[in-house]
Image (spheres, helix red, strand yellow):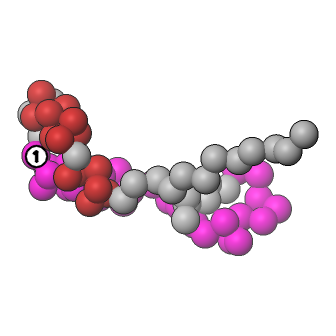
Amino acid sequence: MPVWKLMVREPSLEELLGDEMMSAVMRSAGLDRTGLRAMLADVAGRLSLRPRSACLGEPDCRPSAA
């Protein structure tokens, strides 16, 4: 029996911000595109993420998603 794999890419930030459902959610949270971008940049700046290749053999390393 063949094994099926669903190949779906994750949406980009621009695609998410352009989605009308996401716009409604942001509006209800009191955010706009600029506010959400700033919040994400702030969170990313506080995380110490490194490339996956830099984490080889380090049990407590937190690699980035890229």
Main secondary structure found in the magenta portion: helix
> Which quadrant holds residue 31?
top left
In the image, taking residue 14 as reference, residue 64 lies left or right, namely right
Q: Quadrant of the C terminus?
A: bottom right
Q: Element at badge 1?
A: loop
Tell me, yes or no, whether the highlighted magenta stretch contains residue 52. yes
Judge by depth and name the residue closer to the eye, 54 or 9. 9
- In the displayed image of the protein, which residue is found farthest to the top? 28
Residue 3 higher or lower than 55, as above or below? above
The residue lying at 22 percent from left, 46 percent from top is 19
Judged left or right of residue 6, residue 44 is left
Residue 11 visible to the viewer: yes
* Residue 42 makes an appearance in the image: no
Left or right: where 54 falls relative to 46:
right
Residue, disc 1: 32
Q: Is residue 21 above or below residue 44?
A: above
Mark 1 crowdedness (10 Å alpha carbons): few <14, some 14-19, many ≥20: some
Q: How many marks?
A: 1
11 and 2: which one is in front? 2
Picture coordinates of residue 50, whole percent (x, y): 57, 66
* Residue 42: quarter of image: bottom left
What residue do we see at 19% from left, 32% from top? 25
What percent of the width, then of the height, locates residue 14?
26, 60
Residues rendered magenta in the picture: 32-60
User: Which residue shows up at 14% across the image and 52% down it?
Assistant: 33
Residue 62: within the magenta?
Answer: no
- Asked whether 11 or 53 is in front, the reply is 11
- Amino acid type shown at disc 1: Asp
Q: Quadrant of the N terminus?
A: top right
Residue at left 82%, top 44%? 3
Residue 54 drawn at (x, y percent): 69, 71
